[in-house]
């Protein structure tokens, strides 16, 4: 399971797509493309746990 980013200025429970550096951090951490990340957030919301579960199911 990938690590969730540890940026102290970011609430790690939620994925933010507004800042480029946050998108880069999440895509690196979750090992997905930006489009996959955006699609996952659109499908399940911005909960990091929900997005991780969605991406994991999508890659099976």
Image (tube, helix red, strand yellow):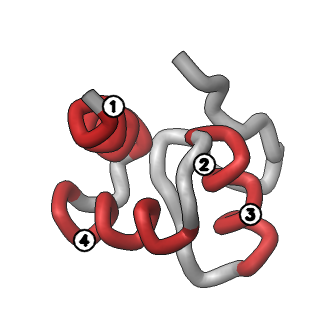
Instruction: Tell me: residue 6, above or below residue 23.
Output: above
Looking at the image, which residue sits at the far left? 43
Mark closer to the chain start, 4 or 2 = 2
What residue sits right under mark 1 in the picture? 56
Mark closer to the chain start, 3 or 2 = 2
Q: Quadrant of the C terminus?
A: top left
Q: Label 2: few (<14), some or many (≥20) within 10 Å?
A: few
Q: Nearer the viewer, mark 4 or mark 2?
A: 4
Picture quarter containing residue 49? Answer: top left
Residue beneath the point at 60% across and 24% down: 2
Element carrying mark 3: helix
What residue sits right under mark 2 in the picture? 11
Element carrying mark 1: helix
What residue sits right under mark 3 in the picture? 24
Relative to 43, 4 lies left or right: right
User: For this rendering, which residue is in front, 31 or 8?
Assistant: 31
Q: Are marks 3 and 2 in contact (CB under 8 Å)?
A: no
User: How far separated are the C-alphas under marks 3 and 4?
Assistant: 17 Å
What residue sits right under mark 4 in the picture? 42
Q: Are marks 4 and 2 in contact (CB under 8 Å)?
A: no
Q: Label 1: few (<14), some or many (≥20) within 10 Å?
A: few
């Amino acid at each position: 399971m990938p690590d969730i980013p540890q940026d102290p200025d970011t609430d790690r429970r939620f994925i933010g797509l507004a800042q480029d550096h946050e998108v880069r951090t999440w895509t690196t951490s979750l090992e997905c493309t930006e489009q996959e990340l955006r699609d996952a957030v659109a499908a399940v919301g911005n909960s990091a746990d929900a997005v991780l579960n969605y991406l994991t199911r999508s890659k099976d």
